[in-house]
Amino acid sequence: MQAANYITELKGDKKGWRYGSDVVIYTERFVDGRLLSAAYQENGIPIYEYSERLDKPAFDLVMDGESMYFGWEFAGYETSSDGSVASGRLTLRHSLKPVLLTIVTQCCGYGFFRRWLEIANASKDTTLGLTSVTPLCGCLWAMSDNLKDNLRDNSVIPYSVGHFADFDWGNEGNFQWQDIPLNTEVSYASTRGRSGHSSPFFVLRNNIYGGYFVCHLGWSANWRTSFFTEFHNDGRASLHFAAMPHSVSPARLIAPGETIKTPEVHFGLNHESFDAAVQNLHSYLRSHVLRSAGPGGQPLIWNHWSYMQHEMSEDGLLREIDVAAEIGAEIFIVDAGWYADKDTPWWETTGSWVTGSRLPHDLFPVFDYARKKGMGCGLWVEIESAGAKSKLAQEHPDWFITRYGHTVGRVLDLAKPQVKQFVESEIMRIIERYELELFRLDYNLDALEGGFNLKDGRYENTLWRHVEAIHEIFDKVRLRFPKIQLENCSSGGGRTDLGIVSRFTTTWVSDWMRLPRTVRILNGMSIALPPEFIDRLAGVVMEASYRGSLDTLMHTIVLAHPTLSGITPALSEANPALLACVKKYVAIYKNFIRTFHREARVYHHTPVIPGADGAGWCALEYVSKDRRKAVAAIFRLVNAEEAVYLLRFRGLDANLKYRMTTEPGGSSAVVDGFVLANDGLSIRLDNALTSKLILLDATG
């Protein structure tokens, strides 16, 4: 049972608040006009007041170039609870500038918290410029012991940060640990104008005394995270961190009487293990952040791209539907190009969201046929763009972002109200026109540092308002169409932050589908996000089928949210053995994995996978909440030194017996949970890019 969440107000000279989530405690103090990050404690026991740190701010704010982390006056504190979340709202008034600041902290269980700031311009006639804001910063794991002399391990770096090391397209999910050098700042940042092919997600680790701090910044544009080990010669050490949106100043102009909200920060601690930290993160996200489109598991998707790509035809799409129906797909998506004329690249006419000459009868015959075959229908739209040959670009050349006096092609400026209104109305119109079961949003654009709009004599950067606009639009979409599936994509994994992911039911985490890297992408991204929200694809698309065995390709996607595309040009040409294999794994996904996917506890036996594409082995284990069902996949990637991997299950009930089935092969046996956990299974794979899938179901 989830433990109660609570907020304790601390009285006395040093006003403060103690936030509790399970056994994790976060304490803040308001002293001398500053809100301070006083203490983090991961075992439920509050520390003495004299042991708290009172020198590090809990946030940072710069308005019109003036630092505002100090100079505040207390204006009130309110608490509330809905039974599962305890919320505190601290209101501060600045002593010099007309700013009213509300700091919202929620205790959400599983050792996790949610934090954001609300910045109000209290002036009646003056516009304020937001230079920068850090919604959360602080200090962790102060060590007062003499690490040099007493512990004799001064060679060990006290703290490390786990993050996605690559920032380029197709390299998502490469989770790596990096030591944080002594008295040297380490920082990571996105500069592409979106949250990027990395992600504003990190895990901090205490290398001396143990413990993990997990953090997500929910921001869909440029961001920055920073880490600093404060170390003294007598061995005292502490770790400082910060997470923030990042843009050219002013990031946002705030009109008199206007209030803006910063990105949300999701953070929590765990001392038990890395697996437990990840599982608590997943439980928190599933309960309080991420959204589903109703009961049941994620639907199996077929994407039309296949062997046609954007040069589609009605007959070609009908052939694709036949293949999709044969293997048991549940939603059929028409991807890019449906709106364009023949022999026109798909990107040249985005923005004109009406069917072109490729589909003279519109999409209705295609969708009618798919629905007769028992599938829902989905459609791809890159709504934030307009190609150079689109009608929109010709009629509204002023609707694009401008930077240094030049228009930036294809990138619509959603900071402009008329553009935002157009984008919102087009999304609603398209969904209603085709009665869509799924809407697929793509965003293949690099706005970089964004554009600039002249307001009140100042150039305001466009990125902040763009993020506000796209988040608000999809909040409205979910309210208007609560049952629709919403698929998030951005050149694959260009926007995997919680700001955008929380508004969608599934996320395309990468366009890279080739083995072995596709396995590492799944392995790494399932640290940051629950696996049922992660799209993976098998088929000819993105050369996914060019390497490895068919079983291994299918093992990869059934552990995620599976999509298929291009397993055969037509049903009449299909290899019977291919169809049988695909159908087998579709049935395994639907009838076994999907039954507990949305509650699965994930165990990363190989959280760090080395190499340019993924070398050695990968082992993933999913276990149901009641520990009666489990699935594990063991992948031999490239350059593995041994042909055998010993898998000791971590999540099973040692008192139960399990019916164990392995694929490929379908062999079955009854095995003790105790044996599987302690002796383990020796998995022999003699060739690279092969794998074993192990299904466990408790007997009796």
Image (cartoon, rainbow, N blue to C red):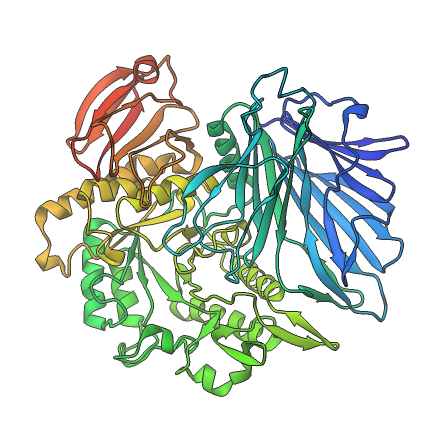
- In the displayed structure, would residue 12 be above or below residue 670? below
**Residue 103 at least partly seen:** yes
User: How far across and how far down the image is residue 506, in percent?
Assistant: 42, 51
Q: Residue at x 41, y 77 (%)?
A: 387
Determine whether 308 is above or below 345 in the image.
above
Which residue: 19% across, 23% down? Answer: 668
Rendered residue at 16%/42% (across/down):
581
Residue 253 as seen in the image, left or right of residue 126: left
Residue 163 percent across, percent down from the top left: 49, 42
Foreground of the two, 198 or 526: 198
Q: Position of residue 394 (x, y in %)?
A: 46, 87
Q: Quadrant of residue 313?
A: bottom left
Where the N terminus falls, by quadrant?
A: top right
Is residue 376 placed above or below 655 in the rendered structure? below
Residue 101: x percent and y percent? 78, 52
> Is 678 positioned to the left or the right of 151 in the image?
left
Q: Quadrant of residue 667?
A: top left
From where the camera sits, is residue 110 visible?
no
* Residue in the foreground of this view, choosing between 434 and 585: 585
